[in-house]
Image (tube, grey):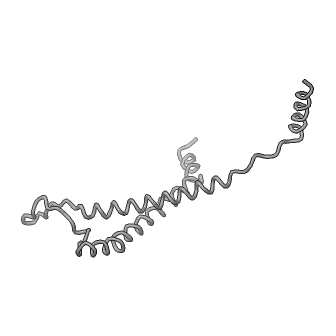
């Protein structure tokens, strides 16, 4: 099989397209949640803590010298990223929980036994009662 045909078969499978759509939606969702954290959640928290801007919180490891900028340990941005991660992880948890719940509902009760199975069961039961 040629490599081009293998690649065509790979790309044309539904799972690849579903995965691509999921990645694109996930990236967009990540940006939305990052904006939610940076622009909606953190400003009121910073205001409650005395006007702290978390995105500006940093420890100066080395001051700026001439053209070289200062070396900063930006722990405020890390806090924002951590909160973003927690929100995204919780949303994914809720999605997976919902999908699992839907899968449980999709499980169908076993099919009714065939006529042959019913007849054999009756014969078996009749033979048991004779003994």
Residue at screen point 43% across, 61% down: 88
Q: Quadrant of residue 81?
A: bottom left
Q: Is residue 51 left or right of residue 28?
A: left
Q: Quadrant of residue 87?
A: bottom left
Residue at far left of view: 66
Q: Is residue 51 left or right of residue 109?
A: left
Residue 108 percent coordinates (x, y): 72, 51
Name the residue nearer the viewer: 95 or 13: 95
User: Which quadrant holds the N terminus?
Assistant: top right
Q: Please tell me whether residue 67 is drawn above or below residue 17 in the rendered image.
A: below
Q: Please tell me whether residue 15 is drawn above or below residue 75 in the rendered image.
A: above
Q: Quadrant of residue 124?
A: top right
Q: Is residue 61 left or right of residue 100?
A: left
User: Which quadrant holds the C terminus?
Assistant: top right
Q: Please tell me whether residue 130 is drawn above or below residue 115 in the rendered image.
A: above
Residue at far top of view: 131
User: How many labels were placed on the picture?
Assistant: 0
Residue 25 percent coordinates (x, y): 48, 64
Q: Is residue 40 left or right of residue 11?
A: left
Residue at screen point 88% across, 39% down: 118
Residue at screen point 90% across, 35% down: 122
Residue at screen point 68% across, 54% down: 106
Residue 77 percent coordinates (x, y): 27, 64
């Amino acid at each position: 099989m040629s490599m081009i045909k293998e690649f065509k078969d790979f790309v044309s499978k539904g799972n690849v397209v579903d995965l691509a759509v999921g990645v694109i939606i996930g990236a967009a969702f990540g940006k939305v949640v990052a904006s939610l954290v940076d622009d909606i959640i953190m400003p009121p928290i910073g205001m409650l803590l005395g006007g702290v801007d978390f995105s500006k919180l940093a420890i100066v490891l080395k001051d700026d010298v001439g053209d070289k900028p200062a070396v900063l340990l930006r722990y405020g941005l890390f806090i924002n990223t951590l909160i973003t991660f927690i929100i995204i992880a919780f949303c994914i948890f809720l999605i997976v929980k919902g999908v699992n719940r839907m899968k449980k509902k999709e499980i169908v009760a076993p099919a009714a036994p065939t006529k042959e199975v019913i007849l054999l069961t009756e014969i078996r039961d009749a033979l048991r009662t004779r003994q």
